[in-house]
Image: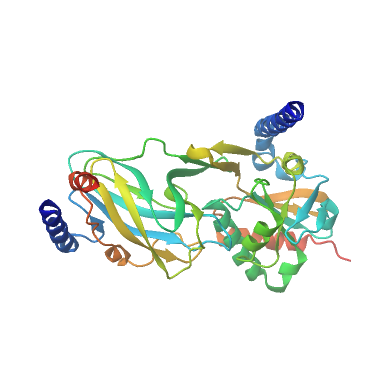
């Protein structure tokens, strides 16, 4: 019990500190900048989330998965249009984020695919998303929904809407799991 | 009992195999219309499908006007809604001339895209756009005629996505391909192409 409350305290303090150095939502190594999604057509069962992932650490990391209450299943996909043919592939081993580098998830490229949407995504709404990284652990963000057909995040502020997940940070996430 | 089961399994297998085989054939057919001289390439042909209101449609249903045809699927998270939204915007720009063309969204995913789901999906776009679906065989037929490539790609946990040709076909009188609008074609050029298509409307 005592360990748990200590953990909670640490988590809380990280939560307070995090916004001070982040445009987006981050933990020690990974920053999630301007996550956003698009409104979906009526009855659509899929959607996509876009963002920029910044890796400030000296070690490469990997986005390995994501969860959200808005969809049954989330997968990391790469989309491209080649010779007029749209191709979409699951990124099987996770999306690499080079040390000191960044990866942009955007329309026509990488996205986190929401599969089995429980209801359509409506412009102006927000939904929670938890991203899992191989090294950085879990990071939770709030994703604003833009208009259908939007090609980029509208406001520079949206990333601020995210909250540091108490479970984030690889080690701590693991400890809480036990 | 076991005999009947075997027959159904064999039939299902056969159907799946022929669908896959057809998809592969289309790869080889696809390149002509887009890069070849569009006006002379023969694409299009007879089809029987069902529209998003449940009515049976054939090539004759849309033959009265030049038409825009797009192949996609409703589980498509990016390209299809973007393209249909672009098309909706261009249709609006055409003003009253918009009525002089037909607009058709044909699914390449007939297993999941029912009449109802196509109808609901299209309610988010311009009302001129009609949705066509059918049996896998019927879809394979029209895709072959329009030289559209599509391929089911399995994902983990038993799901799948569809690779598919993602250009808008602009079809003129006599079922002739006039030109195409590529994915994310710019507004100015797309509207010019559509206006050109309107101008080809047979005077009656």
Number of residue marks: 0
Position of residue A178 measured from the top left corner of the image (x, y, whole percent) = 22, 44
For image coordinates 76% across by 26% down, the residue present is: B3
For this orientation, the residue located farthest to the front is B1
For image coordinates 71% across by 68% down, the residue present is: B98
For this orientation, the residue located farthest to the bottom is B96
Q: Nearer the viewer, residue B18 or A33?
A: B18
Q: Is residue B186 above or below residue A133?
A: below
Q: Is residue B31 above or below residue A156?
A: above
Q: Quadrant of residue A51?
A: bottom left
Q: Is residue B195 above or below residue A77?
A: below
Q: Is residue B168 visible?
A: no
Position of residue B111 measured from the top left corner of the image (x, y, whole percent) = 66, 45
Q: Can you say which quadrant of the picture contains the N terminus of chain B? A: top right
Q: Can you say which quadrant of the picture contains the C terminus of chain B? A: bottom right
Q: Nearer the viewer, residue A71 or B106?
A: A71
Q: How did the renderer colour the structure? A: rainbow
Position of residue A77 measured from the top left corner of the image (x, y, whole percent) = 44, 44
Position of residue B62 measured from the top left corner of the image (x, y, whole percent) = 80, 57
Q: Is residue A80 visible?
A: yes
Q: Quadrant of residue B68?
A: bottom right
For image coordinates 24% across by 38% down, the residue present is: A60
């Amino acid at each position: 019990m005592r360990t748990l409350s200590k953990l909670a305290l640490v988590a809380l303090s990280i939560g307070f500190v995090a916004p001070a150095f982040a445009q987006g939502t981050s933990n020690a190594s990974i920053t999630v900048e301007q996550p956003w999604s698009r409104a979906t057509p009526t009855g659509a069962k899929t959607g996509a989330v876009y963002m920029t992932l910044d890796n400030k650490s000296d070690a490469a990391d990997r986005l390995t998965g994501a969860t959200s209450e808005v969809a049954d299943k989330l997968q990391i996909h790469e989309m491209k249009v080649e010779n007029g043919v749209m191709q979409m592939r699951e990124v099987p081993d996770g999306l690499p984020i080079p040390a000191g580098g960044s990866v942009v998830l955007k329309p026509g490229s990488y996205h986190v695919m929401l599969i089995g949407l429980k209801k359509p995504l409506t412009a102006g709404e927000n939904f929670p998303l938890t991203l899992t990284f191989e090294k950085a652990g879990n990071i939770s963000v709030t994703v604003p929904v833009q208009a259908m057909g939007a090609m980029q995040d509208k406001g520079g502020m949206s990333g601020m809407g995210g909250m540091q997940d108490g479970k984030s940070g690889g080690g701590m996430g693991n400890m809480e799991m036990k | 009992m076991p005999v009947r089961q075997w027959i159904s399994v064999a039939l299902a297998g056969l159907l799946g195999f022929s669908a896959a085989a057809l998809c592969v054939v289309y790869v080889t057919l696809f390149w002509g219309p887009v890069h070849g001289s569009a006006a002379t390439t023969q694409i299009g042909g007879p089809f029987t499908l069902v529209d998003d209101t449940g009515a049976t449609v054939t090539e004759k249903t849309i033959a009265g006007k030049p038409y825009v045809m797009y192949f996609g699927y409703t589980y498509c998270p990016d390209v299809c809604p973007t393209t249909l939204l672009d098309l909706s915007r261009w249709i609006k720009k055409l003003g009253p001339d918009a009525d002089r063309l037909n607009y058709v969204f044909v699914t390449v995913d007939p297993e999941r895209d029912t009449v109802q789901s196509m109808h609901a999906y299209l309610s988010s776009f311009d009302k001129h756009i009609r949705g066509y679906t059918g049996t896998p065989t019927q879809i394979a037929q029209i895709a072959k005629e329009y030289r559209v490539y599509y391929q089911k790609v399995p994902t983990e946990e038993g799901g799948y996505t569809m690779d598919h040709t993602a250009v808008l076909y602009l079809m003129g009188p006599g079922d002739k391909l006039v030109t195409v609008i590529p994915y994310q074609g710019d507004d100015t050029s797309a509207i010019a192409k559509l206006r050109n298509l309107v101008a080809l409307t047979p005077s009656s």
